[in-house]
Amino acid sequence: MTGTTTIGVLALQGDVREHVDALERLGVRSIRVRRPAELAECDALVLPGGESTTMFKLARTFELFDPIVERLRDGMPAFGTCAGMIMLADRVVDGIEGQETFGGLDVTVRRNAFGRQVDSFEGPVDVKGFDTALHGVFIRAPWVESAGDGVDVLATVAVGDPAPGESDTRIVAVRQGSLVATSFHPEVGHDDRMHRYFVDLVTTS
Ligand code: GLN
């Protein structure tokens, strides 16, 4: 199915290995991307979790920033998790001074959004189209504060302590065309359904 497809994992920083392993479990050829020549080999790119404020600077240093932006503009499929979601967002709230993103996703994300007390947590997440909930691991995660009309919301989670009968939810997974992003880390653990979702998107697009 995926014999000729190569999916890169941006390997400047973050949980690169977990993504490579997940793609390998699905039988997909995957390479670590640190140079423009490696990016050129890829049909699609995964942007891992890590630290977006470090990742964008390293992407500049390694001269990958502009080539990635160009590939995204040309329609290369991409899947960002946590910091990777931030890197795909067109707009960031609570970024550092001068923080840049590759962009492409018409969303505003808030960095470290869940607040100090629930800085990191785990729990079930219902993802559109999945039969059963996915175990979501959130580590200083962003959420999607607002999304444009072309963005499909794949998952939300309840937050805070709403009054009875009310609910307060935040968007934690989105898709816009061939771009997919999650606030949580589907690469942690052995539930490969989010990766399969992305691989299916890549191989059918
Ligand atoms: N808080 C991190 C950032 O701003 C993201 C954390 C993560 O990827 N686990 O990039």
Image: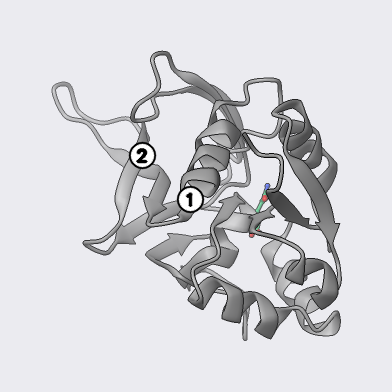
Looking at the image, residue 189 lies above or below residue 153: above
Residue under the image location 71 percent in, 74 percent down: 56
Q: Is residue 168 above or below residue 68?
A: above
Can you say whether 52 is above or below 49 in the image? below
Q: Secondary structure at mark 1?
A: strand
- Mark 2 lies on residue: 154
Q: Taking the image as drawn, is residue 86 in sight?
A: yes
Density class for disc 1 (Cα within 10 Å; few <14, some 14-19, many ≥20) is: many
Could you tell me if residue 182 is visible in this image? no
Q: Residue furthest left?
A: 165
Q: Residue at x 84, y 41 (%)?
A: 17
On the image, the x and y values in percent for residue 156 come to 35, 36
Is mark 2 in CB contact (under 8 Å) with mark 1? yes
Q: Which mark is residue 180?
A: 1
Image location of residue 188, percent across then percent down: 71, 30
Residue name at image x 30 percent, y 60 percent:
147
Q: Quadrant of residue 91?
A: bottom left
Q: Amino acid at mark 1?
A: Val
The quarter of the rendered structure image containing the N terminus is: top right
Q: Is 47 above or below relative to 88?
A: above
Q: Amino acid at mark 2?
A: Leu
